[in-house]
């Protein structure tokens, strides 16, 4: 099973697919932030000016890791002032559309790859796949907006919000986070497969993905500590590169977990996936047979005594003795001409 998993990872080039998913995920972040900032203009009466100013300061501090001081003053500050000054429906709508397109494109990479790993490519149509990717991105966006800040802040932030539950939070915080992460990954694997199988069968891949994500994040932190922090060749791009690498590690872990589930399903197949693979294989065989029949029909319309210009082209469709017989017939016709015809000149 380990060999099958490694072969799947190499065959479907999941490292490149993880990079593709990471790129589109990172591409969705700036327009999403702009749309959320534009939304603050409508709720400033509820949040207060201090909240908006705090958001502006944090974003400007983050932009200084990418832009120079002049770039911050001439680009970032005017954009933030323009966006947060009153409601901006154009920024909200356009930014949200770009973020949804880019984010759903990243989710589509996961869905397509998982489907192909199970040998069920072509079972679900393109339109259904894109709609599923869109819905999953919206769900992930809603869950991530709550879960990610809590995961980054740690249990201390929850204790400050609910001070009476200090002991309970300290005990249950990380187990609950792990269980929710496994449940989310399992659901992603479960809905990505075109046919329904028991939800519990996708748990092993989720556990592997979570373990690889923790290990990869730890190793990436060691790498970034020694290469990105302080003087670095990346310069002002150090922060975006670090974020892109972390997203890439996360996407790689998710795809490896999917490969594990697919390998398990090939060894101990579920009834639904096995039946779907057999049906998909029958469709492929029918398509191949139809192609061979069309090719043979086109060949029959030509002169049967005239061999193909390159007979090896027919070796995939005709038995070897059939190709040899055609060549011999053509050779006999050339060496024994009909009455009244002169034999062809032999080469000197």
Image (cartoon, rainbow, N blue to C red):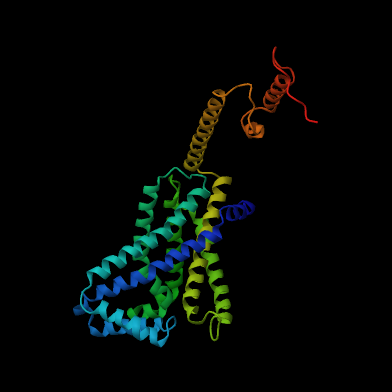
Residue 161: % across, % down:
33, 79
Depth check: 340 or 287 in front?
Answer: 340
Front residue of this view, candidates 320 and 217: 320
Q: Please state the horizontal and vertical placement of residue 48, each as a whole percent of the image.
A: 22, 82
Q: How many marks?
A: 0
Foreground of the two, 322 or 114? 322
Q: Residue 150, located in which quarter of the rendered image? A: bottom left
Q: From the viewer's perspective, is residue 289 above or below residue 213?
A: above
Q: Residue 204: x percent and y percent? A: 52, 56
Q: Residue at x 50, y 34 (%)?
A: 287
**Residue 237 visible in the displayed image:** yes
Q: Residue furthest left?
A: 45
Whether residue 320 sits left or right of residue 220 in the image: it is right
Residue 146 percent location from the top left of the image? 35, 70
Q: Residue furthest bottom?
A: 69
Image quarter hosting the C terminus: top right
Toward which corner of the image does residue 338 lie, by quadrant?
top right
Q: At 47% across and 65% down in the image, what residue appears?
A: 22
| The furthest residue to the right | 348
Q: In this rendered view, identify the residue nearer to me: 12 or 147.
A: 12
- Can you name the residue that lies furthest to the top here? 339
In the picture, measured across the screen, residue 56 lies left or right of residue 298, that is left
Q: Does residue 81 sit above or below 13 in this rendering?
A: below
Identified at 46% across, 43% down, the residue is 122
Please say if 176 is above or below 257. Answer: below
Look at the picture and state if 314 lies above or below 150. above
Image side of residue 286 versus residue 55, left or right: right
């Amino acid at each position: 099973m380990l060999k099958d998993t490694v072969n799947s990872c190499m065959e479907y080039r999941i490292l490149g697919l993880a990079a593709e998913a990471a790129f589109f995920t990172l591409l969705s972040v700036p327009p999403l932030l702009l749309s959320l900032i534009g939304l603050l203009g409508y709720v400033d009466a509820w949040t207060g000016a201090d909240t908006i100013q705090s958001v502006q300061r944090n974003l400007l501090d983050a932009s200084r890791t990418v832009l120079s001081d002049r770039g911050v003053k001439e680009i970032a500050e005017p954009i933030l002032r323009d966006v947060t000054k009153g409601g901006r429906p154009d920024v909200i709508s356009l930014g949200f559309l770009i973020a949804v397109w880019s984010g759903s494109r990243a989710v589509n990479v996961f869905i397509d790859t998982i489907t192909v790993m199970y040998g069920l490519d072509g079972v679900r149509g393109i339109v259904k796949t894109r709609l599923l990717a869109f819905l999953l991105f919206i769900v992930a966006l809603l869950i991530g907006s709550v879960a990610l800040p809590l995961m980054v802040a740690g249990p201390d932030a929850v204790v400050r919000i609910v001070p009476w539950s200090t002991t309970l939070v300290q005990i249950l915080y990380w187990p609950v986070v792990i269980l929710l992460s496994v449940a989310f990954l399992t659901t992603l694997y479960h809905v990505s497969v075109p046919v329904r199988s028991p939800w519990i069968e996708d748990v092993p891949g989720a556990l592997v993905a979570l373990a690889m994500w923790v290990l990869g994040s730890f190793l990436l932190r060691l790498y970034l500590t020694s290469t990105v922090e302080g003087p670095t060749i990346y310069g002002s791009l150090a922060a975006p590169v670090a974020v892109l690498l972390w997203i890439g590690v996360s996407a790689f872990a998710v795809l490896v977990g999917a490969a594990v589930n697919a390998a398990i399903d090939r060894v101990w197949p579920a009834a639904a996936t096995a039946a779907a693979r057999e049906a998909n294989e029958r469709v492929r065989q029918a398509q191949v047979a139809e192609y061979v029949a069309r090719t043979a029909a086109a060949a029959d319309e030509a002169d049967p005594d005239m061999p193909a210009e390159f007979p090896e082209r027919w070796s995939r469709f005709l038995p070897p003795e059939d190709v040899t017989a055609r060549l011999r017939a053509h050779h006999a016709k050339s060496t024994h001409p009909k009455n009244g015809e002169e034999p062809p000149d032999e080469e000197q």
